Image (tube, helix red, strand yellow):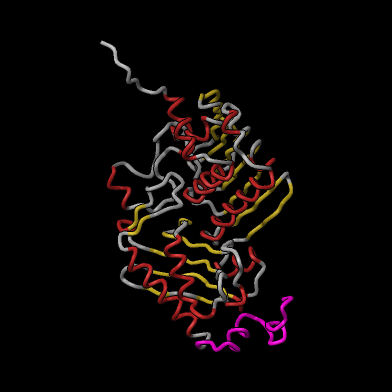
Amino acid sequence: MSGIIQLLPERTANQIAAGEVVQRPASVVKELLENAVDAEATSIKLYIKNGGCTHIQVDDNGKGMNAFDARMCWERHATSKITKAEDLYNLHTLGFRGEALASIASVSEVEMKTKNATESAGTRIVVNAGNLETQENTAATQGTSITVKNLFYNLPARKNFLKSISVETKHIFEEYQRIALAYPAIGFEFYNQDKNLSKLKGGTLKARIVELFNLKEDELIDATEETEIVNISGFIGSPKLTKRTRGNQYLFANGRFIKDHYLNHAISSGYGGLLEDKSYPFFILFLEVDPAKIDVNIHPTKHEVKFEDGRHVYTLLQSVIKKTLGAHFVIPTDTQLHNALGYSNTASNNPSN
């Protein structure tokens, strides 16, 4: 007896998953950079062409893989990060579901070269539209290099939704910035059309921020607090760094960049009268919480998380901002507010400014 319900072919299932995981070239960049971090790389290089639509390459000097793992990593739900559902609440890595590489390979042409410390030769893998075409030994140094070409070439409808090259390049650089900020001890390089746009040496978080955003050290204020619920660390900008857009606001939870308007509001409200109306502060803050008290698995991109005790995290974050600013600024009068924002009396009274 036959019915109308059937199992999807593996290739179709991977392409559907790709619709969630691989939204644009920046999604591929994010996954590959996170894999390089998880591989304990100390040097990561990113190369793109045509906004990542035709070429994305990430090279790292991490642990690399043996021949078996090099083949298995392209299978859907193949992962070294978890073995049971409970492991989702004790995560210490960026990737864990085992969907990303299979999803990427299903909608592109992929080549990987990898080698670990225990094998004399490396492994070269070629996957086209989810189909393994080549697996062979190759000369390689320790680490992994993955090249993704012609994204969505087999799904023209998806490809038509991509934006201009400049817009896609902008999204890629944003992902590069986020991972570079989250792991300042790692050296990063970014190449666009074979031109080096960024070369970051491994070092301190403050040095990484100064280099990425071309700031002065005295414009950054250290914000650190340890509590039973959450540990907060990082830097907030002096009031003169406020802008009319939210662009330079970075919040991380357990090393993972997150988007959380609720917690962003806690930070902004902590500035109180030091902020002008409709202006937004500069901040790069890290929250460290017990992995069992945060759910990072509520969205395929992993940009959204859910805290077990979100209200307390909000209150603590707001209090830390107030306390930090209180050590540098008094409750401002109108004149003091203008000075703190970097305006002179003349400039503040001039309608053209």
Q: Quadrant of the N terminus?
A: top left
**Residue shown at 51% from the left, 27% from the top:** 130
Magenta residue check for 91: no
- With respect to residue 27, does 175 lie above or below? below
**Residue shown at 51% from the left, 44% from the top:** 31
Left or right of 37 in this view: 214: right
> 175 or 318, which is in the foreground?
318
**Residue shown at 40% from the left, 76% from the top:** 319
Image position, residue 167 (x, y; %) = 65, 47
Q: Quadrant location of residue 69?
A: top left
**Bounds of the magenta segment:** 331-353
Left or right of 244 in this view: 64: left
Q: Quadrant of the C terminus?
A: bottom right
Image position, residue 134 (x, y; %) = 55, 24
Q: Quadrant location of residue 144?
A: top right
Residue 301 seen: yes
Spot the residue most to the front: 351
> 146 or 173, which is in the foreground?
173
